[in-house]
Image: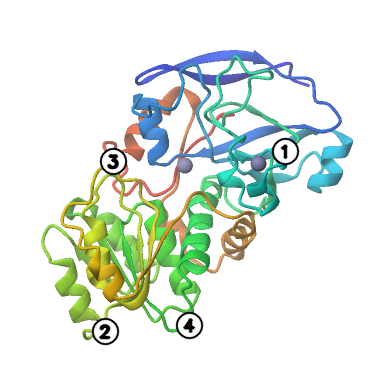
Amino acid sequence: MRLTGRALVHTGPNRLEEREFPLPAIGDDAGLLRVQRCGLCGTDVEQVRGDLSWVPMDVIPGHEPVGVIETVGDSAAARWGVQPGDRVVVEAFVPCRRCEYCAAGQFSSCPAQIQLGFVPVSHDPPLLGGFAEYLYLPANATLHKMSSEVAPDLAPFYNALTCGVDWVTHAGGVSLGSTVVVLGCGPRGIACGLVAKAAGAAQVIMTGLTADAPKLAIARELGVDATIDVEQQDVSECVCALTAGRLADVVIDVVPRVATTLTDAIEITRPRGTIVIAGMKGNGAVPGLRSDQLVLKALTVKGVRGKRSSSYGLAISMLESSRFPLERLAPRAYPLSDALQAIEDQAGNGTDPAGLCISIAPGE
Ligand SMILES: [Zn+2]
Ligand SMILES: [Zn+2]
């Protein structure tokens, strides 16, 4: 039995310091996860660069963990339905389970939650981030089992896929025959495209930049019907042509930091259609926003935050099914010592041309 575990502590912009932590005692209503992989997303890039004003320093980053139960108390084991040796993913939001949002199952809106990957190491116990060999599982954590058959490097894609399931089918209401436009082609965009096809969408169109050509090529291999290079083509004209003027039933906007995609979204959604906004725009104003179009077209606009617990199971079963050629994502894992390289790859500045499934492998 190990007594300590290594973890990376974020001590400043682009500074990740490796430290050894004593493993916490595990009570009756808690657990300890041996982290196999911790997926990365754009939030990790912003966090490690020090661009997230709301996140303190001296935090173990990593909010998309998948691993194996090392130790679990009896009460927690009964409630979570897990045993040591089970492979699970852990939701980043650890809610209070007492407030009105928790009562409604809207855990990501719980005002008293903690978020794994954003908790200072001064917290007792300190191991609450995925860039670590071990992760403490508080009583209120939410776990979902995943088969050990899923390849370790692909396993972190559960996170993007869960977003896809939640945003496309639940928030967007995509179903048999829908026409869907996904604005953006990062991991979440690709996952949205994949889920839309799996849910029966008749036509899925995805946008990206010229530099995103490798990602858009993978999107087409995964079933996306058409892709648009927004630097070379006019989004509105293309969608109009591709849909014979009918436009999209549902538009999912996962583009970060660019608010103009919202004006595109309003333009390319058919009357009575739905726009789902998942990309954070850095709080900027939306240039050229014509709000009358929202009224005249009777559009539904939904912001999404995180995803519902019920979407995890569906996403994990997609991964487990082997029905989708997800090896095309070329998943890649980096040891703790190369975490900054992983962050650069995730940011698109590295050696991975697509960077669609990058993770940290703390035990390797
Ligand atoms: Zn993330
Ligand atoms: Zn709550």
Q: Position of residue 288 (x, y in %)?
A: 16, 57
Q: Is residue 343 above or below residue 299?
A: above
Q: Which circle's residue, 2 or 1, is located before the other in the chain?
A: 1
Q: How far apart are marks 3 and 4 (CA)?
A: 34 Å
Q: Which circle's residue, 1 or 3, is located before the other in the chain?
A: 1
Q: Residue 223 bears which disc, if any? A: none
Q: Distance between the residues labelled 1 and 3?
A: 35 Å
Q: Which circle's residue, 3 or 4, is located before the other in the chain?
A: 4
Q: Mark 4 points at which residue?
A: 176
Q: Name the residue under label 3.
A: 348
Q: Name the residue under label 1.
A: 140
Q: Which circle's residue, 4 or 2, is located before the other in the chain?
A: 4
Q: Name the residue under label 2.
A: 246
Q: Which residue in the rendered view is the most extreme toward the right? A: 74
Residue at 55 percent across and 13 percent down: it is 19
Quadrant housing the N terminus: top right
Q: Does the residue labelled 3 lie within 8 Å of ligand 1?
A: no
In the foreground, 306 or 192: 306
Q: How far apart are marks 2 and 1 (CA)?
A: 46 Å
Residue at 38 percent across and 40 percent down: it is 42
In the foreground, 275 or 14: 275
The kind of secondary structure element at disc 2 is loop
Q: Does the residue labelled 2 lie within 8 Å of ligand 1?
A: no
Q: Which circle's residue, 4 or 1, is located before the other in the chain?
A: 1
Place residue 6 in its image quadrant: top right
Left or right side of 9 for 320: right
Select label 3 or label 2 by which is in front.
Answer: 2
The kind of secondary structure element at disc 3 is loop
Q: Distance between the residues labelled 4 and 1?
A: 37 Å
Select label 4 or label 1 by which is in front.
Answer: 1
Query: Three-letter amino acid code at disc 3?
Result: Gly
How many residues crowd mark 3 within 10 Å: few (<14), some (14–19), many (20+)? some
